[in-house]
Amino acid sequence: GEDVEQSLFLSVREGDSSVINCTYTDSSSTYLYWYKQEPGAGLQLLTYIFSNMDMKQDQRLTVLLNKKDKHLSLRIADTQTGDSAIYFCADRDNYGQNFVFGPGTRLSVLP
Amino acid sequence: DVKVTQSSRYLVKRTGEKVFLECVQDMDHENMFWYRQDPGLGLRLIYFSYDVKMKEKGDIPEGYSVSREKKERFSLILESASTNQTSMYLCASSSPRGGAEETQYFGPGTRLLVL
């Protein structure tokens, strides 16, 4: 079946950039998503990228997609303590309406 | 503002009890989903529904059932709770119209502890 992988933990210092990486196996993925989960809360959509794009920028967030390697990354510039959360990568193919989520990367921002 | 609500934030139940988790969405979405979230495993799909009275098994349906009697409400039922069902349960809904922006909207989650 489809699989989405992420590293489980990342620590950065406040003000540095964070880069969270994700790999996926489904070559028919049409949309790829990044979600953020703050402590005690559900998942909130951060951004998404269509599979025919290789980069998308949204304020402090930059998404890079390497479709050949099936690799997605999320860069957070000037990381703040409020960015501490779990970040989930997810894909959705064009045929289904189900999402496949990665295990989540717990980002810790150190002062 | 879109909203998915779940009936409880925290629940403590005993082994063998029947447990109901309720989810309500106010976005008139056709699709609704139940996931469980465990550390290091991410979200795993339990059941989903694309329409009223319709249900489909996800990746880990064993020990669970669901009910969708009304479009806005999707219930997850643990017929006889077991300790390995201690987890965070997340409900989500989405529209089937297919654009990238038609993401899944999540409720705040129910943290269930089975003793």
Image: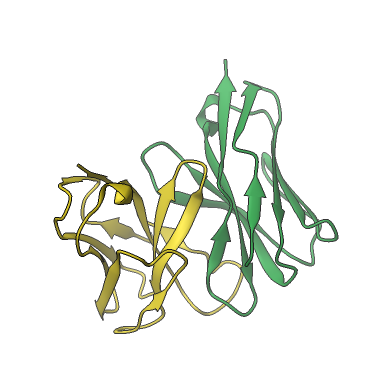
Chain colours: A green, B yellow
Based on the displayed image, in which of its 4 quarters is residue B64 positioned?
bottom left
Q: Which of B98 and B65 is in front in this view?
A: B65
Q: Residue at horizontal 52%, vertical 64%?
A: B103
Q: Which of B30 and A28 is in front in this view?
A: A28
Q: Which of A3 and B2 is in front in this view?
A: A3
Residue that sits furthest to the right in the current view: A68
Q: In this view, does B36 lie above or below A79?
A: below
Query: How many numbered circles are shown?
Result: 0
Q: In the displayed structure, does residue B6 sit left or right of residue B62? A: left
Name the spot of residue A57 as percent of width and height, x first: 73, 49
Based on the displayed image, in which of its 4 quarters is residue B106 positioned?
bottom left
Quadrant location of the N terminus of chain A in the rendered image: bottom right
Q: In this view, does B95 lie above or below B24?
A: below
Name the spot of residue B77 as percent of width and height, x first: 23, 65
Q: Residue at horizontal 72%, vertical 72%?
A: A28
Q: In the displayed structure, does residue B57 sit left or right of residue B77? A: right
Q: Which of B14 and B101 is in front in this view?
A: B14
Name the spot of residue A105 as percent of width and height, x first: 58, 39
Based on the displayed image, in which of its 4 quarters is residue B69 positioned?
bottom left
Q: Can residue B111 be seen in this view?
A: no
Quadrant location of the C terminus of chain A in the rendered image: top right
Name the spot of residue B46 as percent of width and height, x first: 40, 64
Q: Residue at horizontal 62%, vertical 25%?
A: A11
